[in-house]
Image (spheres, helix red, strand yellow):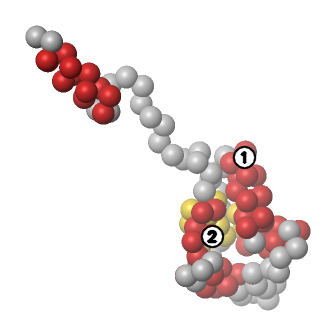
Amino acid sequence: MQRALWSLQSAEANAGTGAPIRWDAVNAELIAAGAPPLGDNNHGHDTSYEAFSARWDDPQEGPILKQFVDRFDGQGIVPKTGNDEAQPEQGGEQTGEVEKMAKRATKLGK
């Protein structure tokens, strides 16, 4: 499953859409990676969500899934891509440890 999630995560990072990846696409990627699908979504009731939710809550498998998946719902999963993380601001107020040390050093020189 890790290989399939990594592949989906990489594809989404490149596409950058932020849209959920549907359960049928998740299952197709799992099958392509040689893993069993999460559930059956061909009979009007998608069991993939319930199967993934149970794995998400599993103390052994959950932490692994949480490395790759930001969130999930009845529509599918949204992989963690790093594209939505806030970029550090350039300039502005200096609040880092190095800047604090520099300020203290300049006060000592007076």
| Residue under the point 58% across and 48% down | 82
Secondary structure category for the residue under label 1: helix
Is residue 47 visible from the viewing direction of this image? yes
On screen, residue 85 versus residue 21, left or right, reads: left
Q: Type of residue at label 1?
A: Ala
Which comes before the other along the chain, label 1 or label 2?
1
Residue toward you, 42 or 3? 3
Q: Position of residue 88 (x, y in %)?
A: 44, 34
Q: Position of residue 37 (x, y in %)?
A: 80, 79
Q: Type of residue at label 2?
A: Leu
Quadrant assignment, res 101: top left
Q: In this figure, which residue is indicated by the disc labeled 2?
A: 65
Q: In this figure, which residue is indicated by the disc labeled 1?
A: 15
Q: Position of residue 78 (x, y in %)?
A: 62, 62
Quarter the C terminus occupies: top left
Verify CB contact (< 8 Å) between mark 1 and mark 2: no
Does 34 appear above or below 108? below
Q: Position of residue 68 (x, y in %)?
A: 63, 62
Secondary structure category for the residue under label 2: helix
Quadrant assignment, res 54: bottom right
**Label 1 – label 2 distance at C-alpha:** 21 Å
